[in-house]
Structures are given as C-alpha cells and as structure tokens.
Amino acid sequence: MLPSLIRTATPLLAGWLIGLGLIEWTGLSEADVSNLVTVLLSAIYYMVARLLEEAWPQAGWLLGLARKPAYAAVKG
C-alpha cells in the first residue's frame, strides 16, 4: 500500500510546487491558480512520468518510488 500512496502523493506535490510559480508569473489569485493548476499539472506530471517509466523502468522514481505497486488478486 505504501508504494501506491507515495506514487500518488509525489505528482500532487510536484503540481502544487509548479502552481506556486504560476501565481508569481500570471498575477492571478492563489485560489484561482491552485484550483486550476494543481489538478491539471499533477495529471500531466503523472502521465509523463508513467510514459517515461514504460520506456525506462528506473524513471519510476519520478513517482516517488522506482517500482510499481503490487496488488493481491481478489478471490471470488
């Protein structure tokens, strides 16, 4: 479970940090930029990181951990 949490939180943190830079650059309010940019940039960051990871598995560190989470099979 910890790997999936790390790999979810890392893109969110990256999006937040990038958003802080846009507040300075655009002059928009912090709330406007935060709402718009955090989700958008986090999704883009995640997509790029996953594409890089597919080509170079060691690039998984961009998601905070260089290994994909393993999930137990559901028996039913």
Image (cartoon, grey):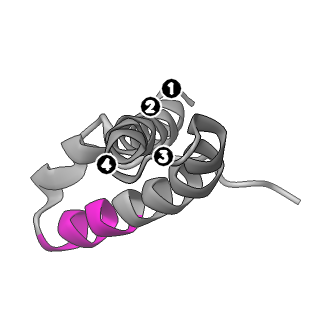
Question: Above or below — where is 46 with respect to 63?
Answer: below
The CA span between labels 4 and 2 is 29 Å
Question: Closer to the observer: label 1 or label 2?
Answer: 2
Q: Which mark is residue 25?
A: 4
Q: Which mark is residue 2?
A: 1
The CA span between labels 2 and 3 is 13 Å
Q: Earlier in the sequence, mark 3 or mark 1?
A: 1
Question: Closer to the observer: label 2 or label 3?
Answer: 2
Residue 48 image position (x, y, % from top left): 29, 67
Q: Secondary structure at mark 2?
A: helix
Inspect the image, locate mark 4, and give the three-letter code of the amino acid beneath it: Trp
Q: Secondary structure at mark 3?
A: loop
Q: Residue at x 44, y 58 (%)?
A: 41
Mark 1 closeness class: few <14, some 14–19, many ≥20 residues within 10 Å: few
Q: Does the residue at mark 2 contact the one at mark 3 (Cβ under 8 Å)?
A: no
The CA span between labels 4 and 1 is 35 Å
Looking at the rendering, which quadrant does residue 3 occupy? Answer: top left
Inspect the image, locate mark 2, and give the three-letter code of the amino acid beneath it: Ile
Q: Does the residue at mark 4 contact the one at mark 2 (Cβ under 8 Å)?
A: no
Q: Earlier in the sequence, mark 4 or mark 2?
A: 2
Q: Which mark is residue 6?
A: 2
Q: Secondary structure at mark 4?
A: helix
What residue sits right under mark 3 in the picture?
70
Q: Secondary structure at mark 1?
A: helix
Q: Earlier in the sequence, mark 4 or mark 1?
A: 1
Looking at the rendering, which quadrant does residue 45 occupy? Answer: bottom left
Q: Which stretch appears magenta?
A: 47-55
The CA span between labels 4 and 3 is 40 Å
- For the residue pair 45 and 49, the one nearer the viewer reads as 45
Q: Earlier in the sequence, mark 4 or mark 3?
A: 4
